[in-house]
Image (cartoon, rainbow, N blue to C red):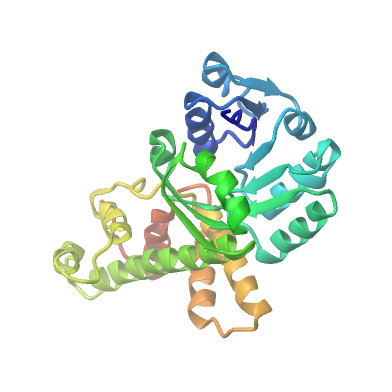
Amino acid sequence: MTQPLPRIGFIGIGLMGHGIAKNIVSKGFALTFLKRRSVPDAGADLIALGATEVGNAREVAAASDIIILCVTGSPDVESSCFGAKGIAEAARGGMIVVDTSTAEPTSTQWLRDRFALLGVEFIDAPLARTPVEAELGKLNTMVGATDAAFAALEPVLKTYCENIFHVGPPGAGHKVKLMNNFIAQAICAATAEAFAASVKSGVDPKQLVRVVSAGGVNSGLFQAMAKTLDGDMQGLKFQLDNARKDLRYYTHFTETMPLTSWMGEAVHQSLVQACAMGLGDGMVAELVTAQERVNGVKITP
């Protein structure tokens, strides 16, 4: 006899979450999602596909076997789980809660311990790639979970992910994500600085791009940053202030071990500086704008 598909709850139908939720319901899973108050009609297409919209996280939990969170960071995750009308108020044994955000490992551990007292499994499965891949169902995810929990969750992950990595026990997913994002932002910050050095020294930065593009230093992130030389600041669709938050989480993570993190602190402060200039609402490519202001050069057209 075929086992019925688990009922899925979803909290966070924003830039990334909307595409994920759409793929889940499109592929046959019953979906209950939390209304997006800032954009009241954001879930209209999900409802048209058969999903159900509710008004708080407790109602999402009451109607679900597996709940997926796609929110900004640890404070939002904690509030959704244990705040007023949160998931915990409707928690029951056997439920799985999946955090796809970039979060602090200490917070993840705290949530996992609290949920365990309720018989609920808390899994970290943060994401990589962009809202474009979310809509296409081609995200990457790195999962921290027991073997049994991963096996139960994998069919759901396959609805919105192209590459699924079981990276270790509970907690490993968020640790890998922080290291991944540190490397990514280090590339972006270094590229912005190199463009400033190029211009200030009298070298056309497009010549630097030609050289890097033909060698081992090249990457998709470098190419996204290179688009700024033609005035495109949207090549990497990741908000600068979120990048700053992620690097803060990373430096907290290294401090807890403790681990020296000279590079992490330098990248973090580069992002902090750019946000302090009022660029935080823009995309990560605004690191180039920050270099222009600090160094008195003109990089973008």
In this rendering, position of residue 19 left or right of residue 109: left
Label tally: 0
Foreground: 59 or 131? 59
In this rendering, position of residue 196 left or right of residue 42: left
Relative to 17, say whether 220 is above or below: below
Split into 4 quadrants, where in the image is the N terminus? top right
In this rendering, position of residue 202 left or right of residue 72: left
What percent of the width, then of the height, locates residue 297?
A: 32, 65
Which residue is at a point 56% across and 49% down the rendered structure image? 151
Which residue is at a point 73% across and 27% down the rendered structure image? 63
What percent of the width, then of the height, locates residue 191?
A: 32, 67
Foreground: 199 or 266? 266
Foreground: 233 or 168? 168
Which residue is at a point 30% across and 54% down the rendered structure image? 224
Relative to 277, say whether 12 is above or below: above
Which residue is at a point 85% across and 54% down the rendered structure image? 117
Relative to 39, say whether 110 is above or below: below
The quarter of the picture where residue 173 lies is bottom right
Foreground: 240 or 74? 74
Relative to 60, say whether 98 is above or below: below
The quarter of the picture where residue 241 lies is bottom right
What percent of the width, then of the height, locates residue 281?
A: 52, 47
In the image, farthest residue toward the top: 48
In this rendering, position of residue 113 left or right of residue 288: right
Residue 2 seen: yes
What percent of the width, then of the height, locates residue 220?
A: 29, 57
Residue 124 seen: no
